[in-house]
Image: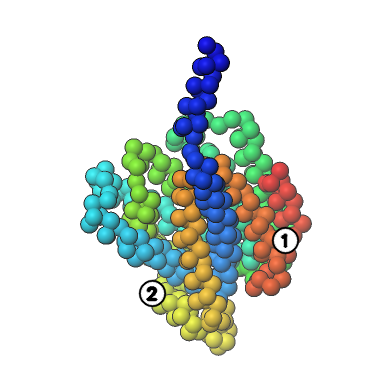
Amino acid sequence: MASASNGTDKATALLRAPPPAETAAKKRRLLLTFGGLLFAGLGNKLCIKLATLPMYNYPLFLNAFSSFTYVPTSFAYIIPMAAAGRFTQRELQIPQLVFATIGALDALAGLMQLLATTFIPSGSLLILLQQSSIPISMLLSRLVLRADYTRAQVAGAAVVIAGIAVILLPSLCVGDSAHDAAGGSSGGIALWSAVLVCSCVPMCLSTVYKERALAAVDCDPVFLNGWVALWQFAISLPLSVPAAPLSGVAMRDVPSNLLDGWRCFVGVDTVGATEAARTGRHIDACWPGSLVYTGLYLGFNQAFNILIVLMLKFGSANLLYLAMTLLVPLGNIAFALPFVPGSMPPTRTNFAGLAVIMA
């Protein structure tokens, strides 16, 4: 009887198992998604820094414009899908206050990150500092969502903090002259590193709030991103006013700076040698980098966000974490390549911090 039962169980398992062709197709889809995520993520990290080189005088425009581009692309999907009745009533009844809150947090995080990306000359350092989102996210999830973590996870977060400390302590103790000479802002590498690390607070708060507010709603990701982007763009414009002095722009000059940013994007220089000598700003060298690098960044950024959703759908959170981890060394290698504009070889502290974080 036992052997007969085992035979029946095996036959049932074979009937329930997906056909080999379907399994192979799923593996190929997952592999393509994983590879695409790495490619888009690397392009995203590389091109955002490259875009700030010709757009150095216009981080306020770059921040607002990157938020705006999500609006028409997202609503080109949302409007026909809503007309066709593809969204559930629960999705349509999500209060706009929820989207506005997420948009406000994303606007603050995005502006802080764009300013720091502009004024920190080392792309390798940018990638390493962004890993601070891991311990910050864990802390906020613990405080707000009462999430529990294993000792191994806590130890991993502590390792990330140690790696960031290895990178930053020499800058705090020795000074920032080398980075300032390489093109950093007068505020110094330590200041903008702190701004970049602090930007992870509103960014992680946005994720935690999103998880808590939308836990009971299976929300279409494009529907969510579209409404959030609309609020993010609307909030990023007034937020540019108090942030203007950080980028060397007087508050009263924000409208003209945004307009000059658009001109730079399409290749028209505004700040020449005379203006640069009078104001202390960088001489514009917009064409063709402003259009090429900004366009590439916007394309990679949208593809990256879509592929994150697909990775969670076809794969798992562990695979997504693996891809994000692999982007750290890949990004450091990319920014050290001599043919990359503005490339800077990683310092010893960058290597030491990378070794600690990847351990």
Within-10-Å neighbours for mark 2: few <14, some 14–19, many 20+: some
Compared to residue 56, the image places residue 285 above or below, namely below
Please say whether residue 34 is visible from this viewpoint. no
Where, quadrant-wise, is the C terminus in this rendering?
top right
Tag 1 residue: 346
Which one is nearer the viewer's eye here, 304 or 99?
Answer: 304
Residue 215 vs residue 173: left or right? Answer: left
Task: For mark 1, give the secondary structure.
Answer: loop
Tag 2 residue: 255
**Residue occupying image coordinates x 45% and y 50%:** 309
Q: Residue furthest bottom?
A: 274
Within-10-Å neighbours for mark 1: few <14, some 14–19, many 20+: some
Task: For mark 2, give the secondary structure.
Answer: helix
Q: Quadrant of residue 54?
A: bottom right
What's under tag 2, amino acid-wise?
A: Pro
Sequence order check, earlier mark of 2 and 1 = 2
